Structure formats: C-alpha cells, structure tokens
Amino acid sequence: MRKLAYLAIACATVITACGADAPQPPSQPTAEPQPSVTPTPRPNLPNWKEEMPLPFPFPEGAFAPVDAFVQAQRLGRGVNFGNMLEAPKEGEWGLVVREEYFPLVRQAGFDTVRVPIRWSAHALRQPPYTIAPEFFQRIDWVIENALQNDLNVVINMHHYEELFKDLEGERERFLVLWDQIATRYRNLPPEVLFEPLNEPHGALDNESWEELFRQVLAVIRRTNPHRNVIFTGADMGTLNGLLQAKRPNDDPHLIATFHYYLPFAFTHQGAEWVEGSSAWLGTTWRGNGTQRANVDYDMDRAVRWGKQNNMPVWMGEFGAYSKADLDSRVAWTNYVARAAEARGLTWAYWEFGSGFGVYDPISLQWNEPILNVLIQKQEATGR
C-alpha cells in the first residue's frame, strides 16, 4: 500500500468569487523519457488569477513521473462516483459525496475512483471564467480523501453541455477552466489523473475534438509536464469513437479510454433519459456464444488500437441499468470485466450508488451479486 502523509486541506485562495491472467504491458524504460510534444499554439487566455496558493502541501518535484503503461495497470479495478458532482448542483440527483464512501470502496477491493465533475456550472460565464473557491475546496476535499484511502483518483470534466452545442463560443472558457484546475493541482502525486472531457459529441466530431484536445493538453502541460492525462475519442467516448481516433501527438503520458455499454438495448433498457428505451424492457443477457463473442471482439479491437497507437487503454465506464433483471446484469458485468482483464485492460464500473449502482446508499448495503463479480478476491495478490 502506498504510504502518504497528508495535512488537512487549507485553501487560502484569493480570487474574485462566482456564484455558481493478462498480457503484460510493453517493457518500460529505466529512465523517464522527456515529453516530445508537437507544439500547439496556445490561445491568449484571460488572466483568471493574481496569486493562487496551493491547497495541498506537496513540494514541487517531490513525486517521480509514472510511465503511462504502468499507471494504467495501477488503475486496476475502479468505480465511478456518478450522479454526485456532475449534477448541476451536488445533491440534485439524490447523491452527495460522503467521507465514508472512500474507505468503503477501498476496503471492498477497488483501486480507483473516477470523479465526474460539472466544473462548468461553478465558474463565471464571462472572462476570466473564475471557478468558485468554495467549489474548488469541495474538490480538494474529494481528492484528499481518495489519496488518504490509497485510491487513485481520476478528475474529469463532465456534462459541459454548452461546449457540445457551441464549440467556438466555449473554447476559451474550456481552456481557462483547465488552466485553473491544472495549476491548482500541479504538485499532487501521480495517483491524481486528469481527464479533460467526458464523452465528446455534438459540435465535437473527431477532427474538432482532437484539435481541442491538443490545445487543452498544451495548457495542462505548462504546469503538469509529466502527469498522465486521459484521451478519448468522439462519438460519446464509445469504442467506435476511439477506433476512429488517432493518437493526438507523441506525448508519452497519455492513457486512452472508452466507455462500454453494448448491447445498448440491454444495458439501457428502461433508462428514463433514453427515448424509446421502455420498448427494450425484458431484454436479457445470459452469455450465449454469440453474446460472448461480441464482447470478445470488441475487447480485441480496443487492445489492437492501443498497440497500433502505442497507448495503454482503460475502460473508464461500463455497467447495466437496474431495470434489467439482476441475473442478466451479473452475467454481463462478470463477462465484460473478465474479458477486459484477460487482455490487460483495467476498468472503472459505472457507477457507485445510483441507477447502475454497486452500493445502496439508503440501506447502506453493497449490491453483493454485482460487487462479487466486480471484485473477485485474488489469493495470489493477497487482496
């Protein structure tokens, strides 16, 4: 277990506030390679800060960079803290992040929490696009609790709906938000990863998204030259979106991701936010030959893309909605997780405690059938 000592987060920020058995990864170099990144012009961004004291007591240079392939393996088995901080306001979707969740997921056997965050709802709409100090303090607390419980934590930008509708109108704001996030967390250990955008779609086709990713990566690299950053394809971050994407540049600290919800009519049957999904109610998944073969084919394609692009691949979301029958959900979850692991892919389940949940926050009980197939105790590892 990594041993880290943490002080309580104290944020003295002075800012104008706003309202709102698997293949092994390639052999790794003995010395940390220096990033060789094709320069990307950086837009002239509004000056959002004067001085910004860091909320964490980590000195610069205290943490050695971690190779992207090594980091991807360390992500292990994860869970998404969904329907919490990506709601327009935390709690509006029935869940808030609670302190007890962090030791709970760690003791259950998870290695990583992915934290979806709607940053865009907590920042000024006009330049300098300042993120509200109180919201930053909330995210400080989330990161601190994850690290204190020996968890990797993936911080993403989730549900930036305005960007998906108006790329040019929101480009500057998106980049400035990440400038603030990257600057604030620049001295945190490598167990903290950045994921610039969840499920690009709408105005962001493959070409425009890859251009925007290069721009935001350049912004992040100004303050975080070696931090591992998550790259995805367009088309809602699906496997097909990733397969249509190309490695954005030769930056060595990139991890690719895709989200897996296939067959969609099974995983999203009865989902209230999906039009026509009520017609899918009763769809089952028993793991027959064809069903298993489809999953295997998809996982093989993900691995092949990773090899072709020399990038580790992480399955950042997968899950089946609770309106599917439990036996089918268990069978599907088990097969998808094992198929990924057999190919060296790590993953994060969607999600912790809501409609797909592995935990019931009302009864304070794990959904044991789902948990048991996600976390299979490994005698060889002592877990």
Image: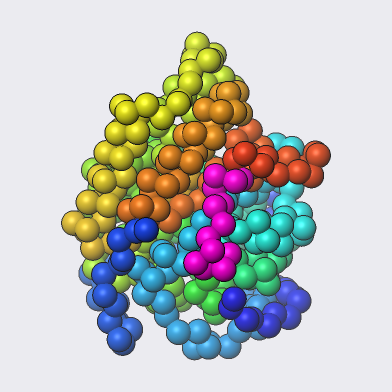
Q: Is residue 183 visible?
A: no
Residue 216: x and y in percent read: 39, 60
Q: Please state if 142 lies on the left or on the right of 267 as rendered.
A: right
- Residue 32 against residue 208 in the figure, above or below: below
| Colouring style | rainbow
Residue 259: x and y in percent read: 42, 43
Q: Quadrant of residue 40?
A: bottom left
- Residue 335 against residue 11 in the figure, above or below: above
Q: Locate the N terminus and report the quarter of the image it occupies.
A: bottom right
Q: Where are the magenta residues, as a range? A: 371-383
Q: Is residue 359 visible?
A: yes
**Furthest residue toward front:** 379
Query: Observer-nearest residue: 88 or 270?
Result: 270
Q: Please state if 169 lies on the left or on the right of 102 as rendered.
A: left
Residue 290: x and y in percent read: 31, 27
**Furthest residue toward top:** 279
Query: Observer-nearest residue: 249 or 74?
Result: 74
Residue at image position (48%, 18%) is 283
Q: Quadrant of residue 12?
A: bottom right
- Residue 200 against residue 44 in the figure, above or below: above
Residue at image position (23%, 51%) is 305
**Furthest residue toward left:** 308
Q: Locate the C terminus and report the quarter of the image it occupies.
A: bottom right
Q: How many marks?
A: 0
Task: Say whether residue 268 is magenta.
Answer: no
Residue at image position (60%, 35%) is 356
Residue 315: x and y in percent read: 42, 49
Task: Say whether residue 373 is magenta.
Answer: yes
